[in-house]
Amino acid sequence: MKRQRRTHTLIYRMADFLMAMLAWACFFLYRKEIEGVEINWQVLEDRNFWYGIVVIPTCWVLLYAIFDKYRDIYRLSRMATLARTFFLSFLGVLILFFTLVLDDFVKDYRTYYGSFFFLFSHHFLFTAFTRMLILTLASRKLKSGEIAYNTLIIGGNQKALELYREVSSRKKKIGNHFVGFIRVNGHPVSELSILLPELGKVQRLSSIIAEHEIEEVIIAIETSEHNRLREILNILFDFDQVLIKVIPDMYDIMLGTVKMNQVFGAVLIEIRQDLMPNWQRLVKRIID
């Protein structure tokens, strides 16, 4: 499944490149039409055309790699992706306009507005359409259970049992393939051990994640076990690629401090490890 997800993410990147190429090709022909050049096959002999449809899309992909999310398309929200696409399209076109287009042929001031709107609208619409199409197909695969992440439950009491039953009983899946669970305390074997294999103790958490290729961990411990939470998180923070989720207390839900991670299903807090976005890391490295 990992290889399949990587392939689909690569297709997502290639689609961004191709749509940027198509948008720039349309914009190039639009500019030639403004200049009064007859549109025919001879226009394609212009070197600037070929330079543009190679260099410009490459710059777009680099921009997305810095400010957007390219890690795993199955983790992406369509609405958030659409909003980011709009913002980055506007930002990228603004940069292109002031670096490459500003010195081009101009009839009057309206030419600038027309050129900007043409490039922005075409790039955004082409990119947004393909992204929404790919992400919709990805969402269907996730809900059907074709794509899933190896998931580990930490906790073996009532909370963990209720979580497992709630998630596994859903008709539309949310991408969890439960590999097993780890019991935090030394209580007798719970009912969860009948449904899932117990993989070991918290002390073996690192080796269990490596052995079973765990990609998502859900911490479902009781309130009385919260003193172990820091120990568990200290171990999990060594694994950057593992998504960590926690079941909140009812007190947190009533205060409104918990944001729903799923529209349907269990209320979970997602603990983000990458507190610094990619663009901030890049700026920091350049300053260093």
Image (spheres, helix red, strand yellow):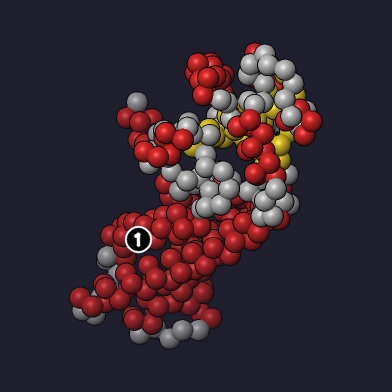
Q: In this view, does 190 lie above or below 85?
A: above
* Camera-nearest residue between 262 and 76: 262
In the displayed orientation, state which residue is furthest to the left.
109
Query: Quarter-wise, where is residue 179 in the image?
Result: top right
Q: Position of residue 167 (x, y in %)?
A: 65, 44
Q: In this view, does 131 lie above or below 36?
A: above
Task: Identify the residue position indicated by label 1 in the image.
Answer: 90
Front residue of 210 and 28: 210
In the displayed structure, 5 sits above or below 163; it is: below
Residue type (three-letter) at the residue carrying disc 1: Phe
What residue is rendered at 43% in x and 66% in y? 124
Q: How far across and down, in percent of the image, does residue 154 sit?
A: 63, 26
Image side of residue 151 versus residue 26, left or right: right
Q: Position of residue 152 (x, y in %)?
A: 67, 31
Identify the image quadrant of residue 201. Answer: top right
The answer to whether any part of residue 250 appears in the image is yes
- Quadrant holding the N terminus: top right
Q: Nearer the viewer, residue 169 or 215?
A: 169
Can I make out residue 49 in this image?
A: no
Within 10 Å of the Cα at label 1, are there few (<14), some (14-19), or many (20+) other Cα atoms? Answer: some
Q: Is mark 1 on a helix, strand or loop?
A: helix
Quadrant the C terminus occupies: top left
Residue found 33% across the figure and 72% down from its top: 117
Could you say where residue 263 lies in the image, as x and y percent from the top left? 52, 52
